Amino acid sequence: MKFQVIKKDGSLEDFEKGKIERVTTAAGLSQEQAKKLADDIEKWAKTSGKNQITTLQVRNQVLRELNNLNQFAANAFVW
């Protein structure tokens, strides 16, 4: 199931887990951790039963996952 992200301005774009990998790597995760987290977020989004989710929903889920995985990276992500 392909799904889209609703951006703050209301526009839509296809979900790209590579973006999650890039920002979580920049926040301090290893490449392997970032890839697994992005895969987990993609699975979460696909099981939501919706074909569109907001950027805020994605951000909040990434933050929940980061808090469980690496507190330093979670703080860097928020900053």
Image (cartoon, helix red, strand yellow):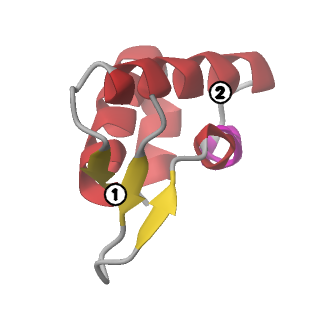
Residue on which disc 1 sits: 55
Q: Position of residue 56 (x, y in %)?
A: 26, 56
The reply to whether residue 17 is visible in this rendering is: yes
Compared to residue 55, the image places residue 60 above or below, namely above
Q: Farthest right residue?
A: 31
CA–CA distance in space, label 1 to label 2: 18 Å
**Amino acid at the residue labelled 1:** Thr
- 16 or 51, which is in the foreground? 51
Magenta residues (range)? 21-27
Question: What residue is at 34 percent from the left and 44 percent from the top?
Answer: 58
Q: Position of residue 77 (x, y in %)?
A: 48, 49
Judged from the image, the secondary structure of the residue bearing numbered disc 2 is: helix
Horizontal placement of 46 versus 70: left or right? left
Asked if the residue under mark 2 is in contact with the one under mark 1, i.e. CB atoms within 8 Å, the reply is no
Badge 2: few (under 14), some or many (20 or more) residues near its Cα, within 10 Å?
many
Q: Farthest bottom residue?
A: 9
Compared to residue 41, the image places residue 51 above or below, namely below
**Numbered label attached to residue 35:** none
Give whichever of discs 1 and 2 has the lower sequence position: 2
Q: Is 41 within the magenta?
A: no
Q: Position of residue 70 (x, y in %)?
A: 49, 23
Horizontal placement of 54 versus 13: left or right? left
